[in-house]
Image: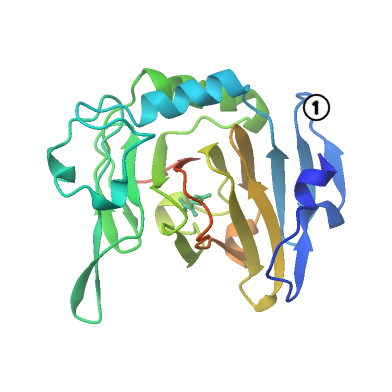
Amino acid sequence: MLDLFDEPCSETDGLLYASQYPMRPHPCGKGHIITVPDGELYYAPDFFEPRISDRAMDVLLANDRYPWQSTNWHEVTDFSEIKWTAIAWQQSMIQMYGRELALPRLSAWHGDNDQTYTYSRIRLHPAPWNQILDWLRGQLTDVSGVHFNSVLLNWYRNGDDHISWHTDAEPELGRNPSIASINFGATRRFILRRSDDHQQKIELPLKHGSLLIMSGALQHHWQHSVPKEKAVKASRVNLTFRVIKSIG
Ligand SMILES: O=C(O)CCC(=O)C(=O)O
């Protein structure tokens, strides 16, 4: 496990690998709990077997038009006409500097009832739970002790897609939220930095079949991002399971 944390990385300023913090094995037998200042991380690089992770990618990206592995998704122009088998993928737009810009990734929101959630100033309406999302959620119960009621999915079509620095500290998530992040597809760099000292950073390479849980006060003290990685040509799907506490 340690060698996964210790992969070389180009960004060195203040960077610490998660392995430099105290860690102990999780009682469930998979992965480790890592105690960081003002928060806790759980990381299991091989939480799901490769066979299950491969199958998950096939189901999450299944649609009526394009084979997900061989399509150049950045060139697809009829995206809104695609019928998705399991996930309600959308190209969300944001207003910035008076212009409407496409987010550099695709996203989907599934969850209980008719809750809405505001994310990156976008109001999301949940699509229902389905077999794969419900099954994945079930896999998280023992390790997290949390019954999640919603999931935000991000699809990074290749290394150009990314997510900028932010916290998951929206009011709907309440204080000290636990957020469980499942990763399928290409390995991408996940970087945390302290909100009050941007030079203090922690990096985890989130690989195919891995699970990261962020908990304690982490969201109130640390920001996170998945930066661009030009060399990455393959898709990655990330699912962050959350508990929404109130109707937005
Ligand atoms: O893709 C990831 O690993 C992070 C996703 C994320 O930051 C989010 O959904 O808020």
**Secondary structure under badge 1?**
loop
Query: Residue 163: percent from the left, percent from the top?
Result: 45, 60
Kindly identify which residue carries mark 1: 27
In the foreground, 68 or 166: 68
- For residue 203, above or below residue 132: below
> Residue 21: in sight, yes or no?
no
Q: Is residue 87 left or right of residue 81?
A: right
Image quadrant assignment for residue 31: top right
Up-down relation of residue 228 to residue 62 (above or below):
below
Q: Is residue 96 visible?
A: yes
Choose top left, top right, bottom left or bottom right for residue 21.
bottom right
Compared to residue 125, the image places residue 121 above or below, namely below
Picture quadrant of residue 203: bottom right
Residue at 79% across, 32% down: 26
Name of the residue lying farthest toward the front: 70
Instruction: Specify whether 149 is left or right of 185.
Output: left
Q: Residue at x 75, y 24 (%)?
A: 28
Of residues 112 and 204, the one drawn nearer to the viewer in this rendering: 204
- Decide: few, some or many residues near mark 1? Use Cα within 10 Å; few <14, some 14-19, many ≥20: few
Q: From the viewer's perspective, is 155 left or right of 8?
A: left
Quarter of the picture holding the N terminus? top right
Q: Is 62 above or below relative to 207?
A: above
- How is the model colour-coded? rainbow
- Measured from the top left, where is residue 247 in percent x and y? 30, 46
Residue shown at the point (78%, 38%) measured from the top left: 32
